[in-house]
Amino acid sequence: MKFKSLILLTGLLITGHSFAQNKLSNGMWRGVLHQGNNELPFNFTVKDTAGHKQIAIINGNEHFKVNDVKVKGDSVFIQMPLFDSEFKLAFEGKGLKGSWIKHLGERDAATPFTAEPGVSYRFKATEAPKYNVGGRWSAIIGIDHPDTTVAEFKQTGAKVTGTFLTTTGDYRFLEGTVDGDKLYLSCFDGGHAFLFTATLKDDHTLTDGLFGRTPWHAVKDENAKLPDAYTLTALKPGYEKLDFSFPDLNGKKISLSDSRFKNKVVIIEIMGSWCPNCMDQTAYLVQYYKKYHPKGVEVVDLAYERTTDFNKSKASLLKEKEHFNIPYPILVTGYSSKPAEVSKSLPAIANFFSFPTTLIIDKKGNVRKIYTGFSGPGTGEHYTEFVNQFEKITDDLLAEK
């Protein structure tokens, strides 16, 4: 009898221990993507909301909410709302272990992932900062095909936030640490995982930088700036208008000759559901549309996806439409996300190289401005400057007879 009681007690203890392990605990977590010899960390919170678990991924001031979180037995499945990626994880002790999986059209890419609860640091600093990286920098990323960028950082104690601005867009909300003379920055948004490291030679010089495996370096330059984004892409000589006919998510063909666009200012966003900068712009355009559609503005998305399969593209774009509550048409071009495919499908455009690219069309149907890339909310004053200029152009075009 005592032996049976002991077995029963042991079973209860094991069951209770297993139950404790298989609970996705609320609070702060530290997740790590294991990319070869590199570890890319980010923080996220877990909480209960409306009867289910919700995760918020933290990058600087951005808290990116994820609602599709399922706990089944010893497993956790997290479906990202954008970028067609997911986590497949299992409980290991109090933490999680598994993979982050990106669905890339015709193939999948898996990255090992671990997470630990109750850890609030991103990069653990072992030394006080020797230098301050706050300010504006002229940064060169790459060697064979270097990309001249502008980096802007803010440093409080050891904590650093900021981003890199480029002609195609920004690297969104980066967050990290200065540990002695080492700089560490990361960002994870479900679509892209960025890791920057560098050595601070002094307050004005960053050396031995790596962006993944790509070298980079920077010098502090408060006058550093990028070329005007309205000057980088244009229509070819002899063209004034844009012509296309692509199906919307219901399969209905839409073109600029349709009556809904007559005598309207039209904004065309060339984008893809895989593109983080496009998502930042979409978030803005949804609010812009609410403000300007009653005044005579239409917005249309031209989607270039990782696959040319209509149904696969539609599935990804429907997630985006639902996430942002997009009220304007999203057209499936049927072309892939290579810049050459955009040039093939829209032959009037010269020097296309960036997602997103935005065309501003006047009430006569003429393309008046083309804006390359997007400076999102992670760029601070640059985002505010874009919004003010973009809406000033819209007001001027609406005022034209």
Image (cartoon, grey):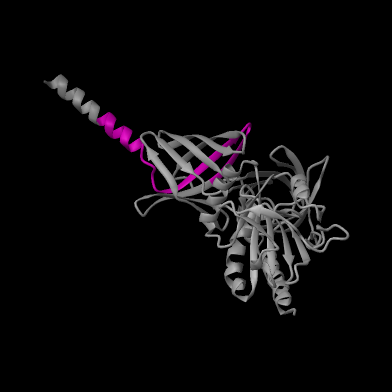
**Residue 258 x/y as whole percent:** 67, 64
Q: Residue at x 71, y 37 (%)?
A: 213
Image quarter of residue 277: bottom right
Task: Locate the C terminus and report the quarter of the image it occupies.
Answer: bottom right
In-front residue for pair 337/23: 337
**Residue 99 x/y as whole percent:** 52, 34
Give the side of residue 76 with respect to residue 180, left or right: left
Q: Residue at x 61, y 71 (%)?
A: 293
**Extreme-right residue of the structure:** 237
Residue 374 is one of the magenta-drawn residues? no
In-front residue for pair 347/169: 347
**Residue 192 x/y as whole percent:** 62, 45
- What residue span does the magenta drawing correspond to? 13-42
Residue 15 is one of the magenta-drawn residues? yes
Can the viewer see residue 378? Answer: no
Image quarter of residue 155: bottom right
Task: Locate the N terminus and report the quarter of the image it occupies.
Answer: top left
